[in-house]
Amino acid sequence: MPGQCIEPQEILDKAIELARLSSWENFSLLELASSLDCGLSQIKNHFRSKDDIAEALFDRADDAMLATSSQANFLSADERLIFAVMSWFESLAPYKSLVREILAYKLEPGHIHLQAHGITRISRTVQWFLHVSGRSYTGINRIIDEIAVTQAYLASFSFFLLDRSKNHRATRALLTRLIAGISRTESFVTRLSRS
């Protein structure tokens, strides 16, 4: 099979499988190539590093969320936002322990380059959430909304990674409260600005 064209999704699936058998830190790209019966150069054609593979897992969550977004068209903007974030979480639910390992790896003190990349990853995912929800503020209101939604997403994501409630109901309840708080604050600020 060496020289055979290997698809990125096949590489990602095998990487997830191997990392779940040992750990994110312990599985290697050499082990991945060996298990796929290919060379490292074929892995590199799609993923320059292990972190690129982690990013592909988060891209898969983005794709899953976007694929289900049309199911939320009849909801309010806040409900669409909650639906989008929860869809993103649910796509990662089978891999929660692996995602915790990936994040721990990224947050190690020597991995500043991964942390910087993580900021753009968070921003990109939040932008998709905002698009799906139809939130379209401008100017300072857009900046405030984006910061508030990012905080709600990160707080909920941290909670989700440890949530053992059925269907992640506790995460949904937390996210719903946080989004409701954002809306109340934005409504208050809008009324103040009109006065």
Image: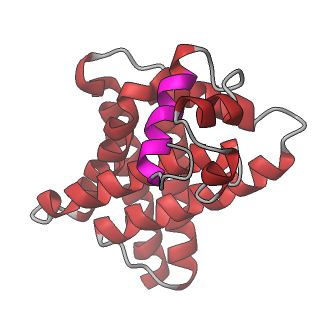
Instruction: Pinpoint residue 168: horizontal percent, then vertical percent.
Output: 30, 26
Residue under the image location 49 percent in, 37 percent down: 157
Q: Residue furthest right?
A: 110
Q: Quadrant of residue 183?
A: bottom left
Kindly tell me whether residue 30 is visible in this rendering: yes
For residue 165, above or below residue 154: above
Q: Is residue 115 left or right of residue 92?
A: right
Question: Viewed as shown, does residue 146 lie left or right of 31?
Answer: left
Q: Nearer the viewer, residue 32 or 94?
A: 32
- Residue 191 location, quadrant: bottom left
- In the rendered image, the residue lying farthest to the left is 74
- Residue 81 visible to the viewer: no
Image location (x, y in percent) of residue 182:
43, 55
Q: Residue at x 51, y 75 (%)?
A: 142
Q: Is residue 51 above or below residue 190?
A: above
Q: Main secondary structure of the magenta part?
A: helix
The quadrant of the picture occupied by the C terminus is bottom left
List x then y, in percent, for residue 121: 60, 57
**Residue 81 in the figure: left or right of residue 124:** left
* Magenta region includes residue 8: yes
Q: How is the image coloured?
A: secondary structure
Residue at the image point whose x is 36% and y is 48% from the top: 85
Range shown magenta: 7-19
**Depth check: 24 or 64 in front?**
24
